[in-house]
Image (spheres, helix red, strand yellow):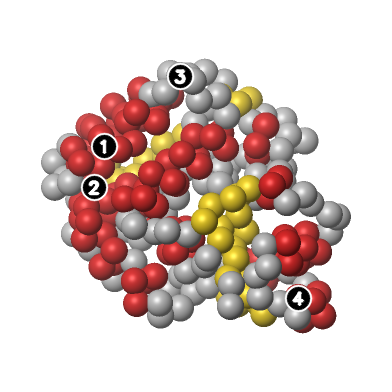
Amino acid sequence: MKKVAILQSNYIPWKGYFDLIASVDEFIIYDEVQYTKNDWRNRNLIKTPQGLKWLTIPVRADSNRAIKDVVFSNRDWGGLHCQTLHANYRRAKYFDEIFGLIEPILIDSNIKTLTEVNVLLIKVICLYLKINTKISYSWDYGLIEGKTERLVDLSKKTEASIYVSGPSAKNYIDQKIFQHAGIELQWFNYCDYKEYPQLWGDFEHAVSILDLLFNCGQNSSHYMRFINDSF
């Protein structure tokens, strides 16, 4: 039975985002929806000696713009993010290996949109973690009206029989619409992650996956739940 998940792109997301990708057969980037400020779309957290720090991409976006149409307000941010990552993670065991994967994307001046940089980074990390899930885009299939109706329609168009959602969507998903469509709705469980070797003070789970990758490299999969398919 085919499983599908549908979610907005995030900037170098936390490990749970990649676990969700790995748990399904197809992952649909849902960036036709409205961009929201102060969210995970253009920023994420890293650890520093002074505590948690936001890495934020400066963007030009009004309240009516779709995520896929959001562009950078300047292109200097990539180099600045590279400098910040080097300053705070250069002592991490696998820094050079992982930094070599992401730096070319971060500094590529040909990348103009938030969706493009987010998806390129997501794909290169999936490749490193050997996550073979198909990644597609909602605009490949077309959208209908209605929050839940859209998700059901996309599931049908991908011929999925199971839709996997993050728990926060319980606030707006109408489960009866999935039932009537004959599509099983499963809730992904983000709990019970193991701690891993981490720099700078008390352990923090809710940081970019870069923290895990810099510290654990190819061993990162041991601290992610998709390996044992336990959700």
Q: Label 1 to label 4, Cα distance in Å?
A: 42 Å
At which x and y percent is residue 227? 34, 71
Q: Callout 4: few (<14), some (14-19), or many (20+) C-alpha neighbours within 10 Å?
A: many
Q: Label 1 to label 2, Cα distance in Å?
A: 8 Å
The residue labelled by disc 4 is: 178
Q: Callout 2: few (<14), some (14-19), or many (20+) C-alpha neighbours within 10 Å?
A: many
Q: Is residue 87 above or below residue 173?
A: above
Q: Secondary structure at mark 4?
A: helix
Image quarter hosting the N terminus: bottom right
The residue labelled by disc 3 is: 109
Q: Label 2 to label 3, Cα distance in Å?
A: 24 Å
Q: Label 2 to label 4, Cα distance in Å?
A: 40 Å
Q: Callout 3: few (<14), some (14-19), or many (20+) C-alpha neighbours within 10 Å?
A: few
Q: Secondary structure at mark 1?
A: helix
Q: Is residue 39 above or below residue 203?
A: above
Q: Secondary structure at mark 2?
A: helix
Please state which of residues 225 and 43 is positioned toward the viewer in this rendering: 225
Task: Name the amino acid, label 1.
Answer: Phe
Q: Which of pointers 2 and 4 indicates the residue nearer the eye? A: 4
Can residue 193 be seen by looking at this rendering?
no
The residue labelled by disc 2 is: 214
At which x and y percent is residue 90? 17, 37
